[in-house]
Image (cartoon, rainbow, N blue to C red):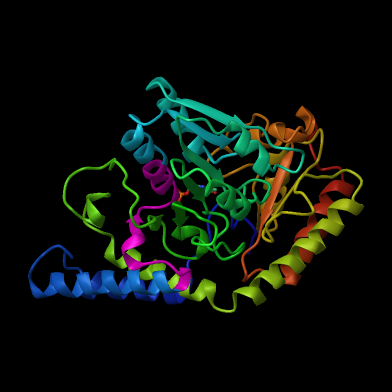
Amino acid sequence: MIYLDNSATTKPYKEVLDVFTKVASHYFGNPSSVNALGSEAEKLLNQSREVISKLLNIHPSEIVFTSGGTEGNNIAVKGTALKYRSRGKHIITTTVEHASIYEGYKQLEQLGFEITFLPVNERGRISIDQVQRAIRKDTILVSVIHVNNEVGSIQPITEIGEMLKKYPHVLFHVDHVQGIGKVPLDFKRSNVDLCTVSGHKFHSVKGTGFLYVRKGIKLEPLFTGGSQENSLRAGTENVSGIVAMTKALRMTMDHQQNKIAHLTHLKNLLFQFVEKTEQTVLNTPKEWSAPHIINFSIPGAKPEVIVHALEEHQIYVSTKSACSSKQTSASRILLEMGKDERVAESAIRISFSAETTIEEVKKCMAVIEDILQQNKVIMR
Ligand SMILES: Cc1ncc(COP(=O)(O)O)c(C=O)c1O
């Protein structure tokens, strides 16, 4: 099997699954219980917080464990909106956010919030100037995706954070779900207040993640109940998942620069292939893009036919983002980047992990070439 859909999810590392099973079977106490089993579980939670905070250069108390990216994004954006609505009801974001952010804005608009969606250029990027020009007296939040999940464009997070220092009334949230481990981000140096991370994108189990909440930032909780996670996220913690995610993060950060160099090499191989192939159009920008995502189109083709043709060779890629790929319409992100309809409705996304080999990428390219040469592509 050649798995090239790592932006949708990654295969958990064996060591991560071993840790998960061990904790789930031996340390199943409730960390809020006062008995010895509960204390053991609480100790594991605290240790996880310590390890993650060291890896990311943050404070342990700044970590709120969640079930993943969707939850982290919802707590960050809606929690800010509800907490600061008496101060202002204006939020700035981009037109290329993940659905877990984008859809929430529709609900906030119904509650009277005004959202400014900054348009992106042909590379899928916004500029610092655009953000600065959109800031108003009643702006409470700027929320920006770090690495776009469909095309891999990188936003200028550190520069936006630097500029926002002049506006202390505006909080800065970053959706770092696709960036972690692949496009390093220093939360403190980038002046980030809130940052979303999801475990299953870096070889942890599903249902794990965390939200970084800078010390002193107050949010309205979306789940109420017990006082877990500083009363920001009520509910018994997923202890085995959290310990497993910590292991996955530690493994991901190990030799990070070498892994990024390897991913970049793979990406360049695929870039060259897409550029020399007549029927394909490259959508991922050559500069300012993450090393693990390549998006290209075969204008006129039905992308799902390519996906299934590759599947016959046990090669797994995707069309759009996993959560919208079952809709056959054109990609919202590609249209926002100014691509025409034929390009936007025929996109293929290939995404690597550090475990992907050169041979696997070469095999994938050979099969695509074969599919195109034999005219197996069904045109619309
Ligand atoms: C950029 C981005 N944000 C948020 C999410 C949602 O994360 P999760 O699947 O953990 O809910 C995803 C998942 O694809 C993503 O790519």
Determine whether, in the image, residue 259 is placed left or right of residue 267. Answer: left
Q: Write down the quadrant of residue 190 in the picture.
A: bottom right
For the record, the magenta segment spans 55-76
Furthest-left residue in this view: 35
In the picture shown, does residue 208 fall above or below 300?
below
- The foreground one among 142 and 39 is 142
- The foreground one among 193 and 351 is 193
Residue 220 picture location, percent across and down: 29, 41
Report whether residue 380 is seen: no
Determine whether, in the image, residue 299 is placed left or right of residue 218. Answer: right
Residue 317 picture location, percent across and down: 66, 52
At horizontal 18% and vertical 65% (from top left) the residue drawn is 31
Q: Write down the quadrant of residue 207 in the picture.
A: bottom left
At horizontal 36% and vertical 31% (from top left) the residue drawn is 87
Image quadrant holding the N terminus, namely bottom right
In the picture shown, does residue 153 fall above or below 2?
above
At horizontal 51% and vertical 40% (from top left) the residue drawn is 142
Residue 110 picture location, percent across and down: 40, 20
Instruction: Check residue 198 for magenta coloring.
Output: no
At horizontal 43% and vertical 45% (from top left) the residue drawn is 73
Residue 52 picture location, percent across and down: 40, 70
Instruction: Check residue 72 for magenta coloring.
Output: yes
The total number of labels drawn is 0
Report whether residue 193 is seen: yes
Image quadrant holding the C terminus, namely top right
Q: Write down the quadrant of residue 140 in the picture.
A: top left
